[in-house]
Image (cartoon, rainbow, N blue to C red):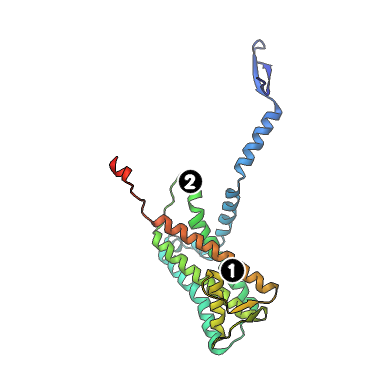
Amino acid sequence: MVVDAHETPDANGDRPRLSAKPSARLRSGLLGLIDRICLIHIWACLFKKLGGYTPLRLLGRKSETINRSYGWVDLWVAVRLSIPVLLLLVGAAWDLHWPKLLVLLLGACSILEVLVVQVNVVLLGGYWAEEEGEKQEVKSVHRLLVNALHNYAEVVAWFALFYQSLQYAFEPVEQNVLPTVDFVNFSFVTMTSFGYPNLRPINTLGFLLTLAQSAIGLMMVLIFLAIIVSALPGPTTRDRVEE
């Protein structure tokens, strides 16, 4: 048997001992580094870093009331959903031309915050709890599901505003009475794949928007499934009852 080590004298100089060669130590250190730099840890660190700069977290740093109150979180979710909905209603009533850059920037930041918060709480919360040797604790699984549904509706509303602001990137397939209904319907169909689209993208920007919304919709559906599965009671089998 070949051992990747060589004999060196001990402190007395009379009895040899084995020590690993530099190549073996380097290989061991490299394997340990690869083991620590895993994909889940990289993504977890990235989303944890982004989560520290969300508006609610920044407010929580200034106020212990916001940081420890679940009611503030629920209110924040409701207010965030109302912003794109009100913009859609006001724009439809008065036919206003919203500043496109402001709408796109605000909507993009809101959607990014939704994704970061949902991923940190639902998908990566258990990972960090295990890293710290603790168990993940939440206020209520049903509350997580309700807030996730509000976030889902918020993303649909923001993308409807995107399509309204960037009408030149789409061509109507079927025109309804209200153009806003077309944008909301197209956003809902793209997000859920339920129904049929009444618009179609005609340039690169339109295709990129629909592709981004489809990917976000798929990710949020997986988050919903994770919440629902965690809320289901564990099954009791006959074998367990007999034991």
Question: Which residue was labeled with disc 1?
Answer: 213
Q: Is residue 235 above or below residue 204?
A: above
Quarter of the image for residue 202 reads bottom right
Q: Element type at marker 1?
A: helix
Question: Which residue was labeled with disc 2?
Answer: 130
Rounded to the nearest angstrom, the CA distance separating label 1 from label 2 is: 32 Å
Mark 2 surroundings within 10 Å by alpha-carbon count, few (fewer than 14), some (14 through 19), many (20 or more): few
Answer yes or no: is residue 76 visible.
no
Q: Is residue 28 above or below residue 77?
A: above
How far across and how far down the image is residue 31, in percent?
64, 37
Quarter of the image for residue 22 reads top right
* Residue depth check, mark 1 versus mark 2: number of the one nearer the observer: 1
Question: Which of the two labelled residues, at mark 1 and mark 2, occupies the earlier sequence position?
Answer: 2
Which of the two residues, 184 or 240, is positioned nearer the viewer here?
240
Mark 1 surroundings within 10 Å by alpha-carbon count, few (fewer than 14), some (14 through 19), many (20 or more): many
Q: Element type at marker 2?
A: helix
How far across and how far down the image is residue 214, in percent?
58, 67
Q: Is residue 92 left or right of residue 234?
A: right
The residue under the point 43% across, 48% down is 135
Answer yes or no: is residue 47 visible.
yes
Screen quadrant of the N terminus:
top right
The residue under the point 68% across, 17% down is 7
Mark drawn on residue 199: none
How far across and how far down the image is residue 100, in percent?
64, 79
The residue under the point 47% across, 65% down is 148
The residue under the point 60% across, 69% down is 108
Q: Amino acid at mark 2?
A: Glu
Q: Is residue 176 left or right of residue 134?
A: right
Q: Amino acid at mark 1?
A: Gln
How far across and how far down the image is residue 112, in percent?
58, 65
Q: How many marks?
A: 2
